[in-house]
Image (cartoon, rainbow, N blue to C red):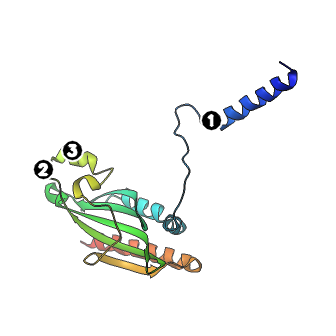
Amino acid sequence: MPAEDKNQRYENILKNIERRHPFGSARKEANLQTPQDRVLNLLNAFDALAELAQRDFERLLCYGPQIVRGPAWSGVVIWHHSKGYHGYQTLRLLGVWAHYREGEIMLSIGIRRLPYRAPVYDAGVYRVAIQNNFRIYYDDDGHPPADGDRLLYRAPFKLRERLEHRQALTDMLDSWISEIEAR
């Protein structure tokens, strides 16, 4: 084998090693974001809701956040229910959604009320499962607020108004905290 071929083979091996992911780590997936995902990222919605889920409320157990998606919408939600044995019967989603409406991206902040849908209730299993996902027990995909849901804010998203939307999100979350703590 000529020296040129050996050097070329060595270079190819080094390039292949460089492209590999470290042993035991997850492979990086292509992160294809939808326009709705980009809107939520511009608003820093995930981090804003994560701060709420970390808080210790006197009367609520709060979980999340979680990213939820549908064909023409994306959202970031946290979910909460009242403390106590019967608190599981009604779960509330507090979320920020970016969705299409009449050809433009709308930004919605709202609260959705979900009734318990599972046939039986086991407190121990529920306590563990609800921390990671609300869909198992409440049979819901986390879609944007509709009629009958509590809409806190809705506006068409404009990039030049991003800071105003961010401020509206902060104001809505502060208002929600005040409301919860006043109960």
Residue furthest front in the image: 1
Secondary element at tag 2: loop
Can you see residue 60? no
Drawn side of residue 47 relative to residue 59, left or right:
right
Residue annotated with mark 3: 125
Residue 120 x/y as whole percent: 12, 50
Q: Earlier in the sequence, mark 1 or mark 2?
A: 1
Q: Identify the image quadrant of the C terminus.
A: bottom left
Residue 2 x/y as whole percent: 86, 20
**Alpha-carbon distance for marks 3 and 1?**
39 Å
Does residue 44 sit above or below 149 in this rendering? Answer: above
Along the line of sight, the residue nearer the viewer: 120 or 72: 72
Residue annotated with mark 1: 20
Residue furthest top in the image: 1
Residue 29 x/y as whole percent: 54, 47
- Residue drawn 74% across and 31% down? 12
- Residue drawn 24% across and 48% down? 127
Q: Badge 2, how many Cα within 10 Å: few under 14, some, many 20+?
A: few
Q: Amino acid at mark 3?
A: Val
**Alpha-carbon distance for marks 2 and 3?**
11 Å
Q: Quadrant of residue 89?
A: bottom left
Does residue 159 sit above or below 92 in this rendering? Answer: below
Q: Amino acid at mark 1?
A: Arg
- Residue drawn 31% across and 50% down? 131
Q: Amino acid at mark 2?
A: Val
Drawn side of residue 29 relative to residue 79, left or right:
right
Drawn side of residue 116 relative to residue 34, left or right:
left
Residue annotated with mark 2: 120
Along the line of sight, the residue nearer the viewer: 58 or 60: 60
- Label 1 with label 2: CB-CB less than 8 Å: no
- Residue drawn 28% across and 61% down? 140
